[in-house]
Amino acid sequence: RAGKVALISQQSEGYVWYSGVAFSRNPWAHAAQSARGYAVGFNGSRGVSWHSAQFFGDQASSIAPSKPEASFTLQWGREGRGNGQFLSAKGVAVDRSGYVYVADVDNHRIQKFNSNGDYLTQWGGAGSGSGQFNGPNGVAVDRDGNVYVTDYNNHRVQKFNSNGGYLMQWGSMGSGNGQFNCPSGVAIDSNGNVYVTEYKNHRVQKFTSNGSYLRRRRG
């Protein structure tokens, strides 16, 4: 009635909302309870019927779960170089036991904590040698507890055990298969394959857990 269409559903039995929040099959459709105005319902070949916004709000609330409320639990860390402190904390990963691994970029290290934020250990240090970092960015953990870190300015991925023991690395600067130009994000799938995003090569590359190149996608 206000002459404004907020959303049009293209489903066979959709609804067009006028001046209100649209009720759709979105899991959080209960938001329609706050809608104002009216809607026209297209009900297939059975004609058109008018309903109030509250009608659709009631329908939404009856089928959609309430959105869980986020609540603050805890935090840890502050600026610094000591144990449990950070200089540009970035990547984070959690293993199957609940241990938390954080890429501490400008301290050139990975720190490990329990789920309550208690400091456990760290590894790394500035450099280009095995186990050292130059701006670690992304962290991922596989089902065996191995930790993969994208070493941004060293243009490589390094692999460690859960206590930081160095296992292997792969990559070098370049744009060829298996090379990197500032690798940033990293993720592991259920088969143990490793996916790496590259900031300056604008692509994602896929590897086995031992660093063997599989494929890439590029925009």
Image: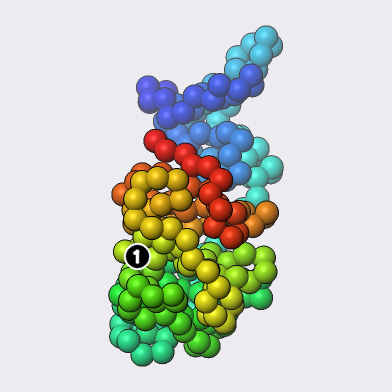
Q: Residue at x 41, y 89 (%)?
A: 83
Q: Which residue is mark 1?
A: 154
The correct choice, above or below, for 176 with respect to 172 in the image is above
Q: For this view, does 81 lie left or right of residue 171?
A: left
Image quadrant in which the N terminus is located = top left
Give percent across and percent down for residue 150: 43, 63
What's the residue type where badge 1 is placed?
Asn
Give the position of the C terminus as an image quadrant.
Answer: top left
Left or right: residue 42 versus residue 75 is: right
Residue positioned 50% across, 87% down in the render: 121
Residue 80: quarter of image: bottom left
Q: Which x, y percent locates residue 135?
A: 33, 69
Q: Quadrant of residue 90?
A: bottom left
Residue closest to the far bottom? 82
| Camera sees residue 19 | yes
On screen, residue 161 above or below 170 = below
Give percent across and percent down for residue 192.
64, 57
Left or right: 132 as drawn, with respect to 117? left
Where does the image place residue 197, in percent across and percent down from the top left?
Answer: 43, 51
Residue neighbourhood size for the residue with mark 1, other residues' Cα within 10 Å, grouped as few (<14), some (14–19), many (≥20):
many
Residue 188 visible in image: no
In the image, what residue occupies the spot 49% across and 24% down?
Answer: 8
